[in-house]
Image: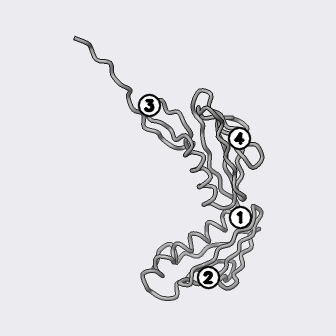
Amino acid sequence: MSRIGKKSIGIPSGVTVTVSGSTVVAKGPKGELSLNTLPEVSVEIKDNEITVSRINDEKQSRARHGLTRSLISNMVDGVGKGYEKKLEIIGVGYKAQGKGKAVSLSLGFSHPVEYKVPDGAEVQNDPENKQILVISGADKQLVGQVAADIRAFRPPEPYKGKGVRYVDEYVQRKVGKAVGKAE
């Protein structure tokens, strides 16, 4: 039995979850998300808890049991509390400006990089530190993908540490070239 799959998911107050056929819909203060479940698993709601069970013991069913439970758990947490990732922009002249559904990044290229933020995610500058971008939304996968897309424009380099990195990311620094004595 899947250790993750057999755990039930508690539904917090303010969140409603409905199951109709193979579709699970979660609604909450942060938005609405839906998931089409696979035919190998079934989802039931009893006593304000969601349980995910598999139909048979085949390898594919066992593999998708825990996956489905994790996806539903992420949906419930996302519509209730939401998710956020923080990116730090390090470098002289590097900056980011969130404007509406787009982000303009100045990352040392000859032109500013424009990134269109997909629906369901929101990008804004941290009010305390303008060098930090905050990506937030209800869908965990979408928030992570937007953060990864923005980071990919200029990943941190190991010599000076310039670039876009996650706030808690550690970048191992390398020593530059050593100048030897000419004899």
Q: Are marks 4 and 1 in contact (CB under 8 Å)?
A: no
- Res 182 → quadrant: top left
Determine which of the numbered discs, if any, sits on residue 16 in the image.
Answer: none
- Taking the spot 72% from the left edge, 47% from the top edge, the residue there is 102
Determine which of the numbered discs, if any, sits on residue 159 in the image.
Answer: 3
Q: Nearer the viewer, residue 183 or 123?
A: 183
Outermost residue toward the left? Answer: 183
**Residue at the disc numbered 2:** 43
Up-down relation of residue 172 to residue 152 (above or below) = above
Callout 2: SS: strand
**Image location (x, y in percent) of residue 86:** 62, 45
Q: CA distance from mark 4 to mark 2?
A: 39 Å
- Taking the spot 62% from the left edge, 66% from the top edge, the residue there is 74
Q: CA distance from mark 4 to mark 1?
A: 22 Å
**Label 3: few (<14), some or many (≥20) within 10 Å?**
few
Callout 4: SS: strand
Of badges 3 and 2, the one in the foreground is 3
- Res 173 → quadrant: top left
Determine which of the numbered discs, if any, sits on residue 79 in the image.
Answer: 1
Q: CA distance from mark 2 to mark 1?
A: 18 Å
Q: CA distance from mark 4 to mark 3?
A: 26 Å
Callout 1: SS: helix
**Image location (x, y in percent) of residue 100:** 78, 47
Residue 74 placement, left or right of 55: right
**Residue at the disc numbered 4:** 125
**Image location (x, y in percent) of residue 156:** 50, 38
What's the amino acid at mark 4? Asn
